[in-house]
Image (spheres, helix red, strand yellow):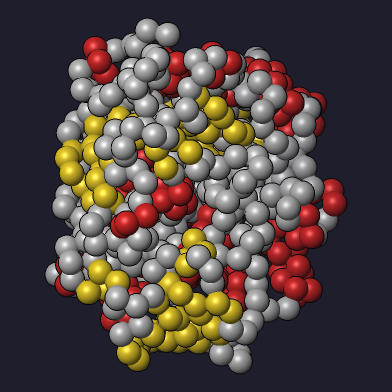
Amino acid sequence: MIRNGRRKIALTAVAGASVLALGLTACGAGGGNEGSGGDGDRALRVWAGSQTPITANYNPFAPNVLHGATGPIYETLFFYNKTTDSEPVGLIGDSFEYNEDGTAITITIKPDLKWSDGEPLTAADVAFSFTYEANNPGGNGLVSAEATDDTTVVLTYSSAQYTTEYQRLGSTYIIPEHIWADVSDFANFANEEPVGSGAYVVEKTTSESYTLVANENFRDADELGVKKVQYIAVDNNQTAQDLLAAGKLDWTSMFIPNPDDVTSNGVIDWINTPQDPTVLYTCSNADLGCTGPQTDVAVRQALNVAIDRAAIKDKAFVGLTGDVSPTFALLPRDEKWVADPANEISPQEADAAEAGEILEAAGYTKDGDFYAKDGVPLELSLISVDGWTDYNDAAKLIAEQAEAAGIKITASTVQWQEFVDARQGGEFQLIVGGVVGTSVADPFQIYRDWFGGTAVESTSPVGTEVPPGRWNFSRYSNPVVDAAVADATSTNDEAEKQALYGTIQTEIVRDLPYIPLVINATQTFYNSRDFTGWVTEDDLYSFPAPWEKVASGYVLTQLEPVN
């Protein structure tokens, strides 16, 4: 995906009284016309996730932004399909071209675009978006963003930007200057009445659901099949599963160990697309304020070999997950980027004896059933999100496996907002969480956003939120990694990138700020009776999850109701 030169881009009973009170439109699953797609006025019902009650926040830069904002309302220039190594699709953008040394990108946007409030969307908005602080933490090497006419913008950087193509063109949200120029405190801006370029606008937000309707100023408004989308708040997997089985949800990604429980109604189909690593986040950096035994690399190394990933895959995820690489390359897609074959796959079986050897070499001694050092017991807290049954089961298994190796872990669940606050602020020891997989066939995105340290403005001290657009919740900071990330940003030479990635991999495989568990099973369930155009195994035009940023908006534009 790293290319030079010009290219044109083508284009059961429902649980919970609160759920029953939502007033779901045409939600029956029976025969006749009830629940059918009809003429497009019937709302497509989507699980909004575990964030309950819903709080109106459509700020694409906020950590608790509602899923409908990122893709359906706000767009990037281009859409990159993470399920395949394919050309990006133009959204706002039409084409782009690098200059000879890769330091400038000339972007042409589509003509006659409008924001949802009817104002013109021009290259000046694009230039503004790239210089806006939330899109541009620490400067990102950007020298200038200049609109040379209404449809052309030139981005100039201090170094070549070949490797950051996706970050620049596929994950930078384009925002209207006439709104955001007056927003100085973007971190606390709820943006309850968003103005975007995507296919939808907000109709209504309540504590139980929020509804998006077709944007009449969308560039392809006449071709939009689904005119209304209702995102429904459900605080646990089981209730969401019951809603699916009852025909009251149309689209959700969640873990269901027996898919037949929801597909036997003749309404719902499903697809599994393992893409994103599931890991143990560790608050690893004592220098930035992390506290607890997990700040000791020996503890992280011992825990890494104490985990029985095969058992977790079988018992918590019923065999639906993939094997994870400690290099964070997605295999087999990214196998050319794995420098050392020994690091291809994380250990699959537990080795309690090796875990003990690592701890004892680091000065820990057994005190009864568990290790301690300098009189301090080796005790860790592990949290996962309440209602995420697969992650909760994995956490319980990890606690049991760690105990066999002399490491005491107390697993508990927290509400979604507690989880967000903990990882953003760094006030945790261990979390079962996900890493956003790369949207192109290259692990650079993960290295930059999840492992890059303070030298690349990717993390912050405990008590301070991680910068927008970055995901280094572990507070990991390693100058060797930072330097390699910086060098990899500017090269278009594959051999040089392989060497730089090898350097990064050596560091992160040893330091384990995120302890890899599995490549998560991403089961997406969708109503194929009432709507067509879904992502299927035969047509992987997008990653299918409704919470996937940018991709979810693209999927919605491909759907049509069944008349």
> Horizontal and vertical percent for residue 481?
62, 64
> What residue sits 50% from the left and 87% below the top?
104
Vertical side of 239 occupied by 521: above or below: below
In this view, which residue lies farthest toward the top?
13
Vertical side of 153 occupied by 278: above or below: above
> Can see residue 392?
no
Vertical side of 543 occupied by 406: above or below: above
Q: Quadrant of the N terminus?
A: bottom right
> What residue sits 70% from the left and 24% below the top?
319
The front one of 290 and 121 is: 121
Q: Is residue 256 left or right of residue 36?
A: right
Kindly indicate the quadrant of the structure image that contains residue 217: bottom left
> What residue sits 30% from the left and 30% below the top?
232
Q: Quadrant of the C terminus?
A: top left
The front one of 369 and 439 is: 439
Kindly indicate the quadrant of the structure image that contains residue 56: top left
> Horizontal and vertical percent for residue 335?
78, 55
Q: Is residue 321 left or right of residue 206?
A: right
> Can see residue 278?
yes
The front one of 345 and 481 is: 345
> What residue sits 79% from the left and 74% below the top?
495
> Horizontal and vertical percent for residue 547?
43, 42
The front one of 544 and 281 is: 544
> Horizontal and vertical percent for residue 287?
47, 54
